[in-house]
Amino acid sequence: MQPNPLRQTLDHHGIALDAEVVAALRTRLPVTAERAVDAIAVQVAEYAGQMTGEFRSRIEAAVQLALGGFLRLAEQAADSDAGTPLDPVLDDAYALGRGEARSGRTMSALLAAYRLGARIAWQEWSAQCVEVGMSAEVLARFAELMFSYIDALSAASVTGHSDQLAVSGRVRDQYRERLAQAVLAGEAEERVRVLAERAEWPLPESLTAVVVRASDARNLHALLGPDTLVLPGDVVGWAGDASVLLAGGQRRALLDALSTARVIVGPTRPWREAAASLERARRLFVRHGLRHRSLDTDQHLVELVVSADEDALRDLRERALRPLAGVRPATAGALVDTLRSWLLHQGRRESVAADLLVHPQTVRYRMSKIRALFGEALNDPDQVMQLTVALAVPPVARSPRTDAGSPVGVHPSPG
């Protein structure tokens, strides 16, 4: 357990209660603990209906241990070391906090129980202290010590609760990463369902693969919700600044949520076909990287189809544009842009000029050069089709490296 920051408020804080007073208070421990548990069962909603049987016995024992530790602290002299009576009690409070986290309860219930238990104990003991003639000064110090003590117990339980959540979260994240690998590797459905149960992940009807920058993965995961699976790029065999999210839910809502992020969103597929979604997103990632705002693969289907065989596309482009081989690169680039727009706009000069942000006369001049270079090819349907396909998408200058051994670079997850 980590050091309790409130321990220092209790060190050298004993008030050396008279041994007879302590003995009288200690005899009331079982009754005080029982009263405290009764009150907690009624007044703390999270424990309603649970204070029975073994659970109640454990809570009563914990209350008695805590109150007993307080009495041992109170009977010490002011200059003594508070560590001895505090250590076992703080350890128990820490363990209680961890147990509450494992039970799925928040700390609010336990803190409310601490406050209520302290109030019941104070009511019981203060009355006895007054009966035995304790001075007002000592009674005030007694009260101060009691509430500082409860604060220390509360802090120990909060630490235990937080530590348990952190451990549980790390374990769950490991399970979910293994689950994502299994889904993408196409492992048997029975195996995936077992992993999903371990990872506390409800299998959705469909999944959408999203390629994101590794540095953005945590924030986007928080944005999309805890049921989104995350895989680092190196796990899927990719080099560079990229991670993969597998998101459930409606596609439209997903696209809206990611509209301003630098991501590539694959198609939505049944969860068993999530690898196909990632493969399509990967192919657009190869062409564009993550330099742009959100790219939806559904809006780039022509590009994906035409670029399915990059090597064949380069050969087609080289053959279709061979008439430009002797033209200076800058001029050839302007002519290629003009020819592409002319083909797509079916020769409408004004539309081509608007598309290229040039004067219609410039389009006319360039097209006269193109006709001189290409000749009858512009009247041949087969040649026009080749030119249209060749110019449909720009060539890839440089592609981010991905694993060449499998479509998405994912291998079956270990045990």
Image (cartoon, rainbow, N blue to C red):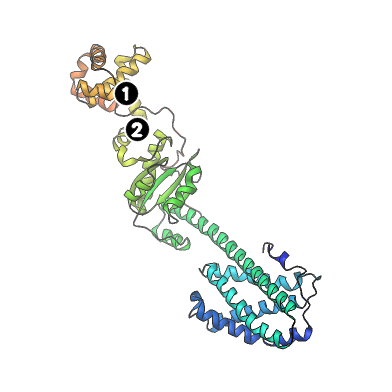
- Residue at numbered disc 2: 309
Q: Nearer the viewer, residue 256 or 193?
A: 256
Which one is in front, 379 or 295? 295
Residue appearing at x 68%, y 75% in the figure? 143
Q: Amino acid at mark 2?
A: Asp
**Secondary structure type for disc 2:** loop
Earlier along the polypeptide chain: callout 1 or callout 2?
2
Task: Say whether residue 223 is left or right of residue 23.
Answer: left
> Which residue is tagged 1?
317
How far across and how far down the image is residue 199, in percent? 47, 60
Residue type, label 1: Arg
Label 1 Cα crowd, 10 Å radius (few <14 / some 14-19 / many 20+): many
Relative vertical location of residue 326 with respect to residue 251 in this rendering, above or below: above
Q: Is residue 247 left or right of residue 96?
A: left
The alpha-carbon separation of the residues under discs 1 and 2 comes to: 12 Å
Residue 89 visible to an observer of this rendering: yes
Q: Quadrant of residue 114?
A: bottom right
Residue at the far front in the pictured view: 136
> Quadrant of the image for the N terminus?
bottom right
Inspect this view and state whether residue 233 appears: no
CB under 8 Å between callouts 1 and 2?
A: no
In depth, the one of 277 and 168 nearer the eye is: 168
Residue at x-position 40% and y-position 34%: 288
Q: Quadrant for residue 324, please give it.
A: top left
Residue 112 in percent (x, y) is at 55, 72
Side (left or right) of 69 relative to 99? right
